[in-house]
Image (tube, rainbow, N blue to C red):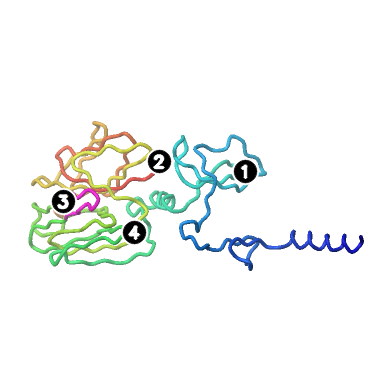
Amino acid sequence: MKNLLISLFLIINTVCLSQVGINTTSPNANLEIAAGTTAEYNGILLPKNDEFPTTATSNQDGMMIYITGNGSVTKGYWYYDHGSGWKKLIQGENEGFLKTYLNPKFPDGMNELQPVTVNLSLGSFTVPTGKNLYITSVYRGNAALTLQAFDFSQSLSYTLISNTRATYGFPTFNNPIIIGQQDYALGNCVINGFLVDATIVPIYANTSYTVPANKVFVYLTSNQTNTNPINEIEIDGSFVTNTGTNNSNSGNAEASTMPLFVDEGQIIRLRNGGIMNGYLIDK
């Protein structure tokens, strides 16, 4: 009986102190989950909720859940911080959201930055999958300049610069032009800028744009295809700025030096028509 009790104690002690391995017999931590043979199952699914749990105490401090977005809470991963409440993890699209407010001109940040200089007169440039292209400078010399973005998903072309008024092809834009993944940049000029990992989706809109629910639209720049380089921009019928566009040159009207922010449900409109470029973020 004594030997049985000793053996039982040793077994219990070993179980209490042992590490746990899933798909491995040699875990390298208190818990290790190794990849299995079925690729689509190699991951962890957290509990999915439409809303936060109604009760949480210090016992749940650090608990993590996934919110579906089907309720009043925005979609994503959340964790419970006792004393402060539920907080959203800063990763993926949320990381881009944070970077947006650190630098609204470059919402993707500089992760995996790759400089780009391309002569579009020799052919179009396709933005790689998973990347966004930021154009910060264009040049064509003593000639009219054109820059277009071809939206791959919609099969539509948008003229972002039509430099009909400039003596030289150096239109003024103080905010970058953003072209999204798999879209094409076309034109007759040399562009300079960079590629970075995409965390936001660029928007091209003709004349007006209605901001979707739970989003904020950040306007960066606009262009007119006519000979007037001035454009009045209104939000829900109220004019907010009288600005130069990408159709102006350095000796003419200057483009807006800072972005405009448009709330969900609001309509931003270019009074004289044209194409605007910007991006969406979660509220």
The numbered mark, 1 or 2, whose residue comes first in the sequence reads 1
**Dot 3 surroundings within 10 Å: few (below 14), some, or many (20 or more)?**
many
Q: Which of the 4 image quadrants contains residue 142?
A: bottom left
Query: Considering the numbered disc 2 on the image, is that residue within a helix, a strand or a loop?
Result: loop
> What amino acid is found at the position of numbered circle 2 in the picture?
Lys
Magenta region's main secondary structure? Answer: strand
**Quadrant in which the C terminus is drawn:** top left
Between 250 and 62, the one nearer to me in the picture: 62
Tag in front: 4 or 3: 4
> What amino acid is found at the position of numbered circle 3 in the picture?
Thr
Residue, disc 2? 283
The x, y position of residue 65, in whole percent, is 54, 45
**Dot 1 surroundings within 10 Å: few (below 14), some, or many (20 or more)?**
some
Q: Which of the 4 image quadrants contains residue 228?
A: top left
Cα–Cα span, label 4 and label 1? 36 Å
The numbered mark, 2 or 4, whose residue comes first in the sequence reads 4
Cα–Cα span, label 2 and label 4? 23 Å
Query: Considering the numbered disc 1 on the image, is that residue within a helix, a strand or a loop?
Result: loop
Find the magenta span and give its range: 148-158
The x, y position of residue 258, in whole percent, is 29, 48
> What amino acid is found at the position of numbered circle 1 in the picture?
His
Cα–Cα span, label 1 and label 2? 24 Å
> What amino acid is found at the position of numbered circle 4 in the picture?
Gly
The numbered mark, 1 or 3, whose residue comes first in the sequence reads 1
Asked whether disc 2 touches disc 4, contact meaning CB atoms under 8 Å apart, the reply is: no
Q: Which mark is residue 176?
A: none
Q: Which mark is residue 159?
A: 3
Cα–Cα span, label 4 and label 3? 23 Å
Cα–Cα span, label 1 and label 3? 51 Å
Q: Left or right? Give the position of 213 relative to 176.
A: right
Relative to residue 137, is residue 56 depicted above or below?
Answer: above
Residue, disc 1? 82
